[in-house]
Amino acid sequence: MSPRPALSTLLLGLLLAGCVPGETPSPQAAPTTATTFASEHPETPPLPDSTPSTPLQAPAACAPGGNGARAVRAPDGSPTRLALLVGIDAYPNLSRFSQLKGAVNDVARMQAMLTTRFDFPPENVWTLCDGDATRKGILDAFEHHLIARSRPGDIVVFHYSGHGSMLPDASGDELDGLDETLVPSDSDRHGARDIRDDEIQALLGRLPEGVHLTLIFDSCHSGTATRDLEGGRPRRLDRDSLLQAAGTRSLAGADAATLDAPVRDYVLISGARADQQAKELKDRPNGALTYYLTETLSRADSALTYTDLMDVVRGRVNEQFANQTPQLEGTGRERYAFSDASSLAEPHLLVKPLPDGRARLQAGAVHGMTAGSRFDVYPPGTKRFAPPAEPIASLRLTHVDAFTSEAEVLSAPPDGLPEAARAVEREHRYPELHMQLRYEGLAASPTLQAVRQRLDALPHIQAVAEDADTYHLRLYEHEGRIHVRQDEVVFSTPVPLDEADAVDHVVRQVSQWARWFNVLALEAADDRAQVVLHLRFDDPNHDGSRPWNDVSEGATMFYSFENRTEKDLYITGVALFATGKIQPFYPFPPGAGERLKAGQKSDEFRIRNLKLPEGDDRPYTRDVLKVFATTAPVDLSSLMQEGIRGEDPTGRLAEDPLGLLLLQATGNTTRDFTPEEVGDWFTAQTAYVVRRR
């Protein structure tokens, strides 16, 4: 019998996503640690020379899970859904450079998506964060929740966000003499409490035959734990001299013995390739993989296979980090995400009635909730929220926390709101958009101080602390020049201090980028894929080794639009170039008011001979195509001039809710906060890379 392509590939490369390559030390030269893993998961005593870090800030609260609750099995014999979600930001035994920012928020996004979009009972989704995600806590939860409660045919999900690492092989089964590990919150720089791939292999081998297993690792290993030049915090951990030359192996190419385990249907989603880093986003506290995976699944208006899902996720992650490409492995790549398309409900939030007559929604600021937004409420179990479905209540958000929101009840049945009712947003109150700017060395630079005085007066730019981890651009003085940059996506020529109008020049640069970022960030409140931008390329120099949207100079781009709504829509397409320029690409001429009928696809259009910007010596550039679709014509041409400067002389933008948002995003007006009806406009966007030949 030929070997199964089951979990051998997975377990030998479990944490390879997001790592820096290097030489692999020989097994004979690597230090060894004799460790026995008993079934009760005993903790290894701390080493005497462990070096705790300085006291940490209080971490974000963990999204509430069903920890310890009795599992809810499907009454009709359909698969039971079980999930264990682990997120670790705070590592008290590691240095301050090893702390993360978005892993706990990853748990919140996953928990909200599984319990709403995919009907995982809240009691069946266990969450472990920071101090609860110890070695013992993770292993015990896997044992008592996933193994003990799962049955053949059930859907089992394990998600881990945090550090991954490598340690000398303890069992002699690794070709390179190294075990891949998860790094629990009580681990230290020696990895005494790390969870090795051998242990995870043993746990997975005890799952019942026939379960549908999904493993998601937004983590990596190897290298140092300091922020890299791209600005995204990498989820990797160096084990001092033990791992300074640690090597990597390809997930797809690992050559190892097959795990003798009954799990034949599995999917492994990992943050990046073995030679890359899995990063946290610069402008929001989440891992890039988790954020775009949950966003894509929440937006989808039909079931997606894992292959379809990851095609989208890779593109969205690549918009932020060119050198991070999420991976998909396993035998279940062509099955629907989380195995059961019949449970796919339209996006909604669970409602919990409160004793004071108010209500709580299981989503907060991390999920994009804003005070003042209005929701319709439908009976428990509702999967479609358009007519003939009728709401039973109405809510308006009054207070938004990180993971939950509270609402006043505008209308409700005589006997009150039922438990587990489902809320759908109908009016969204948009927050003002700000580009976040981090000044570095401000106190020592009079020029930077003058720049800040000017920029503080602009409503669409917001200064953040010098040590802030969340920002769009960095502004600093170095070697007689002012640098405005956000590595990886954008680039501005440094401005010499002795330039006559240096302050004006820097202010223009930053203001231009602020408009660029704010237009890029503007997204419709209806978060389903209602409008689709289809993109393909004809590139004779593409050999298949690069992603589909990574093409060479001279390639031809083909694009078309699809309207999946029940309304006729007016389509406007704009290109956001890596030079900071915004230019319309559809319709032509701009402002022509092209309408796409409900449920229809447009013709296919083309742009020939893609090029890099003149005078740009970088090896590649990454640009973004963004589509705005509106139920009434909106002329955006006055915003799309070179440099994105100027006001709206026609007044046509100010007549439309989307136009008001765009004016505010580009700093041309301020707004009141009147909620706008969800469904009046939609957005879609796709990034692509043009590479020098």
Image (cartoon, rainbow, N blue to C red):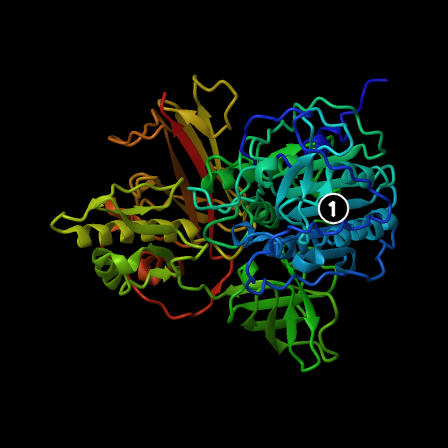
Number of numbered discs visible in the structure rendering: 1
Instruction: Work out which residue is located at the far left of the displayed protein and give it.
Output: 500
The single residue placed furthest to the front in the displayed view is 48
Q: Is residue 432 above or below residue 499?
A: below
Amino acid type at image mark 1: Val
Question: Which one is in front, 263 or 624?
Answer: 263
Q: Quadrant of residue 446?
A: bottom left
Q: Is residue 218 above or below residue 549?
A: below
SS for dot 1: strand
**185 lies above or below 10:** below
Between residue 434 and residue 301, name the one nearer to us.
434
Q: Is residue 564 visible?
A: yes
Query: Is residue 26 left or right of 6 when viewed as pictured?
Result: left
Q: Give 681 or 278, whichever is nearer the viewer.
A: 278
- Quadrant for the N terminus, please: top right
Q: Residue at x 49, y 46 (%)?
A: 226
- Residue 550, x across and y down, in percent: 45, 28
Quadrant housing the C terminus: top left
Percent x, y for residue 74?
84, 53
Q: Which residue sits at x=69%, y=24%?
A: 28
Q: Position of residue 210 (x, y in %)?
A: 85, 37
Residue located 30% across and 40% down the image? 579
- Residue 117 showing in the rendered view: no
- On the image, numbered disc 1 is attached to which residue? 157
Using the image as rendered, state which of residue 653 and residue 495 is in the foreground: 495
Query: From what the image shows, is residue 620 above or below residue 649?
Result: above
Lateral position of residue 172 relative to residue 77, left or right: left
Quick one: which residue is furthest to the bottom in this view?
356
Q: Is residue 513 left or right of residue 191?
A: left
